[in-house]
Image (cartoon, grey):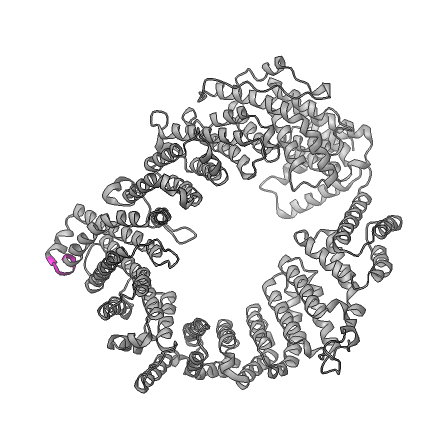
């Protein structure tokens, strides 16, 4: 078939393939035909014809993809004439059609031309950079020049380029002389683009750029007259603006900062003049900001560039001044993404250069802060406002305590502004527009983010001026406190008021605002508590103790009113009830935070303690009616109370003992709240009581029995014949709670753990009893195994050897008898975790479990885990963890110690017996780690190589005879193959160290036996090339690690190069 016929056939195939009516079967057939065409040796010649004679974009892209393969894989073996022909076709297309071509085609052609230059410039393509410069000076091809310049920057200088180190360094060296002239051209282009886009530069004077350095190549020279002719045209601004900013942004990632003239920075800042753009062009301002920020991402200030960054700071100040001027900008139109970039710029300047700016006599950092302050006040958008606070946060982190007095006025003004910003009383118009319903991935609403962010800045300021900040917060809080007392009492007792509110919407809205402001300010007050409870803060005067205690009393009083009122049960408007619930929740949360201070100062009276119990327990006693946020805050307060106050003091109240009687039967609004309540009961009943009388001890044991009996009663009544759904529901509920309780008590004393185990012993034994019957229910079996993971991890000592043995025997027996059920991935993972805890248990008695554990793993679990490794890598990781524990904690199972073997501990290891007792089992376990090195999952590979290195460090594994004779060469082959194949490049350093440690067992063996065998099996290289690799490695033979690893890298790199060259057919 001739060229025209081939083109017509390909066009027809491509049109058919992309037609929506073509069936998948037919598409598969077309794919096979296209792949066959790709593999034909001379398909690239037809592609050259296709791209110059077709109007189908599908055909062009298909042809370019084939040509890209030729350039990247077969270029060095190609005929020079054909290479020149391809280069000319690509360049001529860009010249003739680059402007009109679709974006993706223009990019593809540029990429292919740059790929050629990456291989041939300057030796076989000497005019590449001069062609790019000429295009940048040509009106009709400016866009093409920018695309080529950006692509060259990306391909030549990116860290992830596939160039070898020497070629990359050569390209960098070749590009460096072009930098001055490139930036002169780009600066002039920017100046013209700014003018023609209607943007007015912020300063009328322009700095004259310095003369360009003299370059030895005459072809690179550009006179000032030539520069003057650059881009004096009205550009297709959008595409050009985007392309030049993108190009400069990438250049900024690698060009030396000393080579960047401030004039180009000034031009880029002119693109941030958003008042000159239409609304849809806001992204141009964002791109300009991103370009500037790229300089600061590098986090370096080379000597001599200090003035450059000072000018950058001054441009930023000018931008902030323009933004703060309502005569220039419509502040409400500022995009949040633009503010994010501006905030990022400000933060980077503060973090990297603030200390330098403070030292400059002609710079006032207060001017910068005042502009940020104005912007923070003016911005109406929550997102933009929060971005401003990010800048304040960066600034506050940079302030040194000895300099904080310089900024005290602006910081206290900021506190005052923030307090007004978060109150409806002073910022109603903005706050009413904030969303309070939709939640983000952190479960925060826009409102909660707004308040939290503001409070964090207030707290950071309070670290420098605690009392002043605290007093500023107290002023509005006290006003809202008085209002709340009246509102709460009125709403809880005055029926007429409730009826009136149902008809008066404006009054309801006013009350909602008051309640929300009180809630917000209470949250702010709670956030400040940590400053006063910090024992390292010696600057806090004791004179404020009475004031703080008074505030605590008022918070406690307000919480008592809220608990008594129970407005969530009233007939109020739903919005009003929600606001009341928020107040109630924040008051309880504030009590929790300030309680630490009260206990620290020993100011907790019996009356206050009783009141704390009275505001907490009634809320938890009625889970059906209490709103979840209120219940959760009450539970957290109870947890803090029971953790900080000695249990006997809390147990004196009848309310508390009554609550314990029913606590485990209460169905709280969330499992989190229930767990917190159960933890509180554990604090009360299981923590050490200190010295107590017999009556207290009897009451304690009685309440422990009552609590755990109620908690587990339904589960202990389950039998093998109980209806399935009931089994699932009760197990899910009870075993989850029991597991959490055991985990909660992990740091308790042994006496407390003993009391806990006695209380749950019957439930643990019942779980073992029903496990064989319930293993068929996956969720139930997981819950039982999860319980035993915690029990064995926390209470194994109290459980004893017999109890542990019984549990392990049950699990092993069920695992063998019910293999088809137990081998569900989630069950295997938990079972492996249980066995790992048994293996790691101290004492020799537990080693008796090892034979049955190893038998189960090798015969039953390993075959399943290995076949499902890619689908369930986490199960494979658990298996490796178990084997690692066996080899670390039970090494004596395989190797008898030197003392028991009759050798002195001082005798060298190689004189002692080097033969394991269980050789086949040890080899099988180590082979599992070897198989793990072949897995594609990087976490499995990392764990396996880490385990091998750890075992070698601990037990000298690589020197053991069994490892040397049976496994060493296999492991070396896998690890060296990993380096050659680049299968786990991120862990190449770990792999190289492991190879060195294995080779160092016997370097002579490594070079004379292993390496020749490895090279004989090295696919893709010839015997002669293998000899070269061997010779080079042997010539550089050295035993120290750095030299060996350096030579190993060269060996691997050369092997990869040989294999790549051999895989490239000529074209």
**Magenta-span inclusion, residue 491:** yes
- Image coords of residue 946 (percent x, y): 66, 62
Residue 796 to residue 453: above or below: below
Image quadrant holding the N terminus, namely top right
Residue drawn at (72%, 80%) of the image: 896
Which SS type dominates the magenta stretch? helix
**Residue 23, x across and y down, in percent:** 61, 46
Q: Identify the residue at image location x=72%, y=72%.
A: 924
- Check the image and report above or below for 244 versus 204: below
**Residue 710 visible in the shown view:** yes
Please tell me whether residue 775 belongs to the stretch shown in magenta: no
Q: Quadrant of residue 100?
A: top right
Q: Is residue 573 left or right of residue 796?
A: left
Q: Nearer the viewer, residue 618 or 894?
A: 894
Left or right: where does residue 999 sit relative to residue 559? Answer: right
Report the side of 940 relative to 523 (left or right): right
Magenta stretch: give its range.
490-495
In the image, 370: left or right of 495? right
In the orientation shown, which residue stands out farthest toward the top?
225
Taking the spot 75% from the left edge, 67% from the top edge, the residue there is 958
Residue at the image position 58 percent from the left and 23 percent from the top: 186
Depth check: give the residue in front, 244 or 561: 561
Q: Is residue 610 above or below residue 414?
A: below
Q: Position of residue 10 (x, y in %)?
A: 70, 35
Q: Is residue 872 visible?
A: no
Q: Quadrant of the C terminus?
A: top right
Number of numbered discs visible in the structure rendering: 0
Residue reaching furthest left? 496
């Amino acid at each position: 078939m001739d060229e025209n016929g081939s083109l017509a056939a390909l066009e027809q195939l491509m049109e058919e393939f992309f037609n929506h009516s073509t069936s998948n079967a037919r598409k598969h057939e077309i794919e096979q035909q296209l792949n066959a065409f790709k593999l034909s040796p001379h398909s690239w010649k037809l592609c050259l014809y296709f791209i110059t004679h077709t109007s189908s974009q599908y055909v062009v892209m298909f042809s370019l993809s084939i040509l890209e393969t030729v350039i990247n894989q077969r270029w060095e073996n190609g005929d020079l004439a054909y290479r020149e022909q391809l280069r000319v076709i690509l360049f001529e297309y860009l010249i003739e059609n680059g402007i009109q071509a679709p974006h993706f085609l223009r990019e593809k052609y540029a990429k292919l031309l740059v790929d050629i230059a990456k291989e041939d410039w300057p030796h076989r393509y000497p005019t590449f950079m001069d062609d790019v410069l000429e295009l940048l000076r040509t009106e009709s091809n400016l866009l093409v020049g920018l695309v080529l310049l950006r692509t060259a920057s990306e391909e030549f200088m990116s860290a992830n380029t596939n160039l070898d180190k020497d070629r990359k360094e050569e390209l960098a060296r070749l590009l460096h002389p072009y930098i001055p002239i490139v930036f002169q051209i780009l600066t002039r282009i920017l100046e013209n683009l700014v003018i023609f886009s209607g943007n007015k530069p912020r300063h009328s004077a322009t700095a004259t750029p310095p003369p360009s350095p003299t370059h030895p190549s005459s072809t690179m020279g550009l006179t000032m007259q030539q520069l003057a002719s650059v881009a004096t045209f009205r550009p297709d601004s959008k595409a050009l603006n985007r392309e030049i900013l993108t190009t400069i942004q990438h250049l900024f990632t690698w060009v030396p900062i000393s080579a960047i003239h401030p004039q180009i920075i000034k031009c880029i800042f002119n693109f941030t003049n958003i008042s000159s753009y239409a609304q849809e062009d806001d992204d141009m301002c964002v791109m300009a900001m991103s370009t500037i920020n790229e300089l600061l991402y590098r986090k370096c200030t080379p000597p001599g560039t200090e003035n450059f960054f000072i000018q950058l700071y001054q441009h930023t100040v000018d931008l902030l001044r323009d933004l703060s001027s309502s005569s220039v900008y419509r502040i409400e139109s500022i995009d949040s993404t633009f503010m994010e970039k501006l905030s990022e710029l400000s933060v980077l300047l503060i973090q990297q250069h603030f200390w330098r700016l403070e030292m400059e006599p002609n710079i006032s950092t207060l001017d910068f802060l005042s502009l940020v302050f104005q912007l923070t006040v003016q911005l109406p958008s929550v997102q933009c406002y929060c971005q401003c606070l990010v800048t304040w946060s960066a600034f506050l982190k940079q302030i040194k305590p000895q300099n904080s007095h310089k900024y005290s006025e602006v910081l206290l003004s900021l506190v005052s502004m923030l307090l007004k910003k978060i109150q409806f009383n002073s910022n109603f118009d903005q706050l009413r527009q904030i969303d309070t319903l939709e939640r983000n991935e952190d479960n925060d609403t826009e409102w909660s983010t707004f308040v939290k962010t503001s409070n964090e800045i207030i707290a950071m300021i309070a670290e420098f001026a605690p009392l002043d900040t605290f007093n500023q917060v107290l002023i509005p809080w006290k006003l809202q406190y008085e209002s709340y007392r009246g509102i709460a009492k009125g709403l809880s007792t005055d029926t007429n008021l409730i009826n009136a509110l149902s008809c008066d919407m404006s009054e309801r809205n006013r009350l909602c605002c008051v309640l929300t402001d009180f809630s917000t300010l209470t949250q702010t007050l709670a956030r400040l508590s940590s400053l006063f409870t910090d024992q390292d803060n010696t600057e806090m005067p004791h004179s404020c103790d009475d004031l703080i205690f008074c505030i605590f009393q008022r918070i406690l009083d307000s919480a008592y009113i809220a608990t008594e009122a129970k407005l969530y049960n009233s007939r109020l408007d739903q919005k009003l009830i929600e606001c009341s619930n928020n107040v109630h929740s924040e008051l309880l949360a504030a009590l929790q935070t300030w309680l630490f201070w009260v206990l620290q100062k020993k100011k907790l009276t019996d009356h206050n303690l009783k009141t704390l119990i009275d505001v907490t327990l009634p809320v938890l006693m009625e889970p059906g009616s209490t709103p979840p946020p209120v219940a959760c805050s009450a539970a957290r307060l109870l947890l803090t109370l029971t953790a900080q106050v000695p249990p006997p003091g809390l147990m004196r109240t009848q309310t508390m003992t009554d609550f314990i009687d029913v606590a485990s039967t209460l169905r709280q609004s969330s499992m989190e709240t229930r767990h917190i309540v159960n933890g509180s009961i554990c604090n009360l009943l299981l923590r050490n009581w200190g010295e107590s009388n017999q009556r207290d001890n009897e009451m304690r044991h009685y309440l422990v029995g009552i609590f755990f009996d109620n908690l587990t009663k339904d589960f202990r009544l389950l039998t093998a014949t109980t209806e399935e759904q009931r089994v699932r529901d009760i197990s899910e509920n009870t075993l989850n709670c029991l597991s959490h309780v055991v985990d909660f008590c992990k740091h308790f004393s042994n006496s407390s753990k003993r009391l806990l185990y006695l209380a749950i012993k019957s439930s643990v034994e019942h779980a073992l009893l029903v496990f064989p019957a319930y293993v068929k229910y996956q969720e139930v079996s997981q819950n039982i195994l999860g319980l035993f993971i915690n029990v064995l991890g926390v209470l194994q000592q109290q459980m004893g050897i017999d109890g542990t043995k019984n549990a392990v025997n049950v699990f092993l027996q069920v695992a063998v008898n019910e293999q088809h059920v137990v081998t569900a991935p989630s069950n295997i993972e938990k079972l492996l975790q249980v066995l790992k805890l048994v293996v790691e248990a101290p004492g020799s008695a537990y080693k008796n479990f090892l034979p049955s554990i190893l038998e189960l793993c090798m015969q039953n679990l390993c075959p399943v885990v290995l076949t499902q490794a890619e689908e369930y890598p986490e199960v494979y990781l658990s298996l490796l963890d178990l084997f690692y524990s066996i080899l670390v904690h039970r090494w004596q199972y395989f190797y008898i110690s030197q003392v028991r073997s009759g050798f002195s501990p001082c005798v060298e290891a190689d004189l002692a017996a080097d033969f394991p007792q269980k050789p086949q089992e040890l080899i099988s376990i180590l082979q599992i780690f070897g198989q793990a090195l072949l897995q594609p999952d990087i976490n499995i590979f990392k764990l396996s190589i880490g385990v091998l290195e750890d075992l070698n460090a601990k037990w000298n594994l690589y020197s053991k005879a069994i490892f040397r004779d049976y496994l060493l060469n296999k492991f070396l082959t896998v690890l060296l193959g990993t380096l050659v194949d680049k299968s786990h490049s991120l862990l190449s350093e770990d792999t190289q160290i492991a190879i060195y440690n294995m080779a160092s067992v016997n370097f002579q063996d490594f070079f004379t036996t292993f390496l020749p065998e490895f090279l004989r099996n090295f696919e893709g290289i010839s015997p002669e090339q293998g000899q070269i690799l061997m010779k080079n490695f042997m010539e550089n033979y050295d035993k120290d690690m750095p030299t060996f690893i350096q030579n190993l890298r060269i060996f691997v790199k050369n092997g990869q190069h040989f294999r790549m060259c051999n895989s490239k057919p000529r074209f």
